[in-house]
Amino acid sequence: MRRGRIRIAVCLAALIGGAFASQDAPIRLESRRELFVDHYLIERLDNARLVLHEPRDEGPALAFDKPWEGAFSGYVTIIRDGDVYRAYYRGLPSSRQDGTSAETTCVAESRDGIRWTKPELELFEVGGAKANNVVWAGDPPTSHNFSPLLDSRPGVDPAERYKALTGTDRSGLFAFVSPDGLRWRKLRPEPVFTKGMFDSQNVAFWSESERLYVMYFRIWSGGGWEGFRTVGRTTSPDFVHWSEPEAMTFGGTPMEHLYTQQTHPYFRAPHIYIAVAARFMPGRQVLTEEQARQAGVDPDYFKDCSDAVLMTSRGGSAYDRSFMESFIRAGIGPKNWVSRSNYPALNVVPTGSHEMSIYVNQDYAQPTAHLRRYSLRVDGFASLNAPYAGGEMVSKVLSFGGERLFLNFATSAAGEIRIEIQTPEGEPISGFALADCPPIIGNEIEREAAWTGGPSLKRLVGRPVRLRITLKDADLYSIQFR
């Protein structure tokens, strides 16, 4: 009887043009992990939705308290290289015009991404001493927004396994390289890219899925210094020759000022680019002059506010903004509601077997300026969610290359998840119907799905199918066939 009702529902939905849109070819998942951060896999939701999750505030991670660092330190990049984490950032004690000799590029190190120290590298003399954590200085404007990456391109020259882009709109962007992330040199004396407004962090990485270097940088909608601060993109085969830039699109969502966008490949699913962007609200003043004075905020830096939002991309010139709401809200109290505070660092990194961390600049333009750590479960940016009453998702037509299905999920004690594998027309496949799937209950980063006949999906590998996932008081963060 249940199967008959499913057939009737599918037929009715097809008649009204609703349930299963035509699709030229299945989505080929192969063995990629897929996160529920967008509607990429989703054909239909019934009493289920995508939910954005709030990172947990883990407190201060790194104080910008050295004489050459200070209140205007920022543009942080976090890189994990083996068992070493490094945080790169601009050191700037007082407000200056962008790109002056007062700016330095600093580094802090960690073994776990939680506790940080500042090495005395003795590479550059600053303030009459070389006992400091400065990795680049004395070459304005290249310490203004020095943004490094660990190059994952196959066959990369070991002497250039670290790369960076830096510069301003007046100078263009210069390319730097390093064997160890500490000792840097310019790749060439002239800038490698000049078609943008590079007054904030310009980020690049090697894309496994696009097989190119990809760079994201600041532009203005409408051209000139008018309109909205938004994002441009360019690509390169060699980190030197870059394509004609194109403006990123946002799927028709409202335009907002994005001061930095921090786009990077997610470490567990590098074909998905995560962008934890600084949403800037110019002129949206929260503090009074007296509150700013009491907090010690620079007088020029309290008449705007900002927070962090989550965007994603799967390559090309489009961001997905499934979530317009704040991802990381500004913290409690006036100190967190000043200009250019709450700017996220580049890169989300693992900081435990079940945990990943995001870092955010706070108390900008104040004596207490610091980097703060926030945590999430791995893959836990967002989830497919249904309430206690239950709900379901039916996927688009897809094919997969793995013989097992693994879930990152959480249910309540009363909740559950079940998975049905269907034909493209919505018919349950024998042995993989909903009734064949015992309830999946618990809270695990990796649980193998199984049916009464066992977990093997060997006979379905490469076939076009749909997934029907039912949930009750549960969250599903990611799936992977492998």
Image: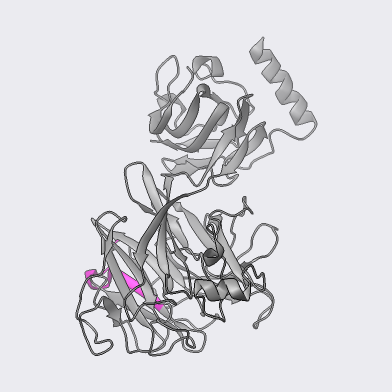
Q: Residue at x 28, y 78 (%)?
A: 134
Q: Count the numbered circles shown.
A: 0
Do we see residue 24 in this rendering?
A: yes
Q: Nearer the viewer, residue 441 or 12?
A: 441
329, above or below 147, in the image? above
Q: Position of residue 344 (x, y in %)?
A: 47, 63
Q: Is residue 377 left or right of residue 154?
A: right
Q: Residue at x 60, y 41 (%)?
A: 50
Does the magenta portion include 405?
no
Q: How is the image coloured?
A: one colour
Do we see residue 404 in this rendering?
A: no
Q: Is residue 170 left or right of residue 318?
A: left
306, above or below 33, in the image? below
Q: Nearer the viewer, residue 72 or 358?
A: 72
Q: Residue at x 40, y 68 (%)?
A: 76
> Within the image, what quadrant is residue 47 found in?
top right
Q: Residue at x 28, y 57 (%)?
A: 115
**The N terminus appears in which quarter of the rendering?**
top right
Q: Position of residue 126 (x, y in %)?
A: 27, 86
Q: Which residues are magenta?
A: 152-165
Does the magenta portion include 161?
yes
> Within the image, what quadrant is residue 378 found in?
top left
Q: Nearer the viewer, residue 335 or 447?
A: 335
Q: Is residue 330 left or right of residue 66?
A: right
